[in-house]
Structure formats: C-alpha cells, structure tokens
Amino acid sequence: MNNFWWGKRISILGAIFLLAGNSLASEPAFDCSKAEGEVETLICQVAELAVLDQKMQQVFDKAMVQLPAEEVKRQKEMQRGWIKGRNECWKANDVRDCTEFAYTSRIVELQVISGQLEVPPIVSLDCGDNSQPFTAVFYNQTEPASLVLTRGDDQVIALAQPMASGIKYLGQNVEYSEHQGEIAISWFDNTFECQVRQ
C-alpha cells in the first residue's frame, strides 16, 4: 500500500504550505545534521516533505496533550514504529510518493483519534449481515478526505482516492467505494454490498 499514489500532490501539499507558513518550508522538525538513511536525507532536501514533517510534529504534540495517559503511551510506541515504517520507503518504487503517503495517513489518523477535528454525523449502513453492523464517519476537512469505518469493535481509517466518478477510500485491508448510491465494502477477507440505513 505504501506504493499507492492517490494523485493531486500539488493541491494537497499547497494547502499544507498555507497552513504551515513560509517559515516552516525549508526545515523539518528533526535535526538534518543527524539525518540517517535515504528517506531522512530526502526529507531534508525536499521542502514539501519538510513541511509535512513539521505538520506531523504539530499534530503529534497536540495529540499527546489531548489523549488520556494510557493512549499517549500507546501512540508514542506507534509513532516510533511509524518512523521506522516511513524510513522503509527507500525500498519503494517512488520514495517520495511513499514518504508523502506515510506522512499524510499518519497525520489524519492522529487528528481523528485525538479529537482535533469536529466529528461529522455517523452514517449507519445496512450490509445484510447486521450481527456486526457497519458505521461510517466522513471527515471531509482532512487532506485528503478520510473515512472512519467501524464494524463491531474493529475500526479502520481510510483515505480518499481520486475517481473519475463516485468515491473510493482505501485503508489497511479495507476498501470503501460508492457509485450512484451503491456501496461496496471490502473488509479484510470479506466483501459486502451495503445501503445507507434509513
């Protein structure tokens, strides 16, 4: 999934530039004199990636203040794992695209789980098997737009993908697509045809 390119790089990163300000455009949050490996070196060389790193640090710091203590501990561990995963992008066909995807998906995840965004209405879905019902929450204010899809006790955050028509969101082992009112969900090893519950 790290190799997946969702396009619209200019519009997404342009918005981040406006948020971050020109003073953050050239330096990431970490010390470039201590950069290790191809990915960290690239972040120090590419202004857009440096802005993403600054944005990540801002969102992460805010999350650490807003989350409960136990979740703070968990997210710190996840952040260390995320950094290792980001640095593995040197193996990708397009290192820059992979690195951008890593940043954008993690930023959205932290914003959602720490309550940094206003929560939109919850949409209930009828997918036939309602023993573990699906719900969807669409965050159109993130870049890119995102979806929190829940089934029973399991929850996945998925990111919007460019489509000629309809909408599609991709997350880890999950795909949500909607076209002309028809909803299809691929949830790990299962597929569902769904409708919005009235």
Image (cartoon, rainbow, N blue to C red):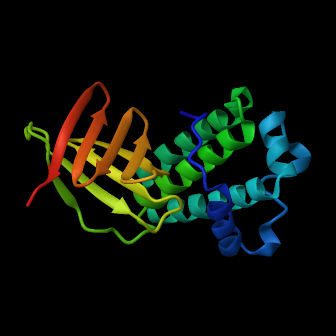
Where does residue 102 sit, x and y in percent of width and height? 60, 44
Q: Residue at x 25, y 68 (%)?
A: 121
Q: Residue at x 59, y 39 (%)?
A: 82
Q: Is residue 29 visible?
A: no
Where does residue 115 sit, x and y in percent of width and height? 41, 65
Quarter residue 13 falls in: bottom right
- Relative to 191, residue 196 above or below: below
Q: Nearer the viewer, residue 27 or 64?
A: 27
- How many numbered discs sit on the rendered protein? 0
- Relative to 142, residue 88 above or below: above
Q: Nearer the viewer, residue 186 or 183?
A: 183
- Relative to 91, residue 160 above or below: below
Q: Residue at x 46, y 59 (%)?
A: 145
Q: Nearer the viewer, residue 13 or 193?
A: 193
Q: Residue at x 8, y 39 (%)?
A: 128
Q: Is residue 87 visible?
A: yes
Left or right of 49, for residue 129:
left
